[in-house]
Amino acid sequence: MNDQPERGDPAEMDLDELREEIQTIDREIVELIAQRTYVAEGIAAVKREKGLPTTDESQEEAVMERAGDNAEQFDVDANLVKAIFRLLIELNKVEQRETR
């Protein structure tokens, strides 16, 4: 099952159109990272309020497992996707520590 959004057929697009498509996708990726960061800030605020630790290893493992499952669903290299998610998690943890 492939739930990727409808995009132009690369075989029918010229180089400029393909590059424009990449620019659109890149912007969407950044927008999603920003949304994820905003939600992570909310999680950090709740953790501060409740005196919970910044790191939750079981939650991190669950995120990594979901990342791998999603990668497989979209036929993308799971190791690459997991590496990206490790970076996102680390960035959120650094931000949480800085705001404590």
Image: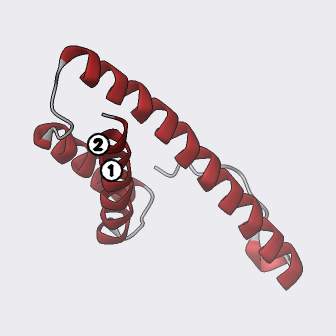
* Residue pictured at 31% horizontal, 55% vertical: 90
Specify the label residue 97 is tagged with: 2
In this view, 39 is above or below 16: above
Mark 2–mark 1 CB contact (< 8 Å) = yes
Tell me which residue sits at (71%, 51%) in the image: 6
Give the numbered dot on residue 8.
none
Corner quadrant of residue 12: bottom right
Residue 53, image x, y percentages = 15, 32
> Looking at the rendering, in which quadrant would you find the C terminus?
top left
Quick one: SS at disc 1?
Answer: helix
Mark 2 residue element: helix
Which residue is the site of mark 1?
Answer: 94
The image quadrant of residue 96 is top left
Asked whether residue 38 is in view, the answer is yes
Residue 78: image location, x then y, percent: 31, 65
Q: Residues within 10 Å of mark 2 (few under 14, many from 20)?
A: few
Which amino acid type is shown beneath numbered disc 1? Val
- Seen in the picture, residue 75 relative to 48 is either above or below; the reply is below
State the residue lying farthest toward the left.
58
Residue 14 visible (yes or no):
no
- Front residue of 58/9: it is 58
Please identify the residue farthest to the top as the structure is shown.
50
**Residue 29 appears left or right of 37:** right
Q: Would you place residue 43 above or below residue 37 in this image?
A: above
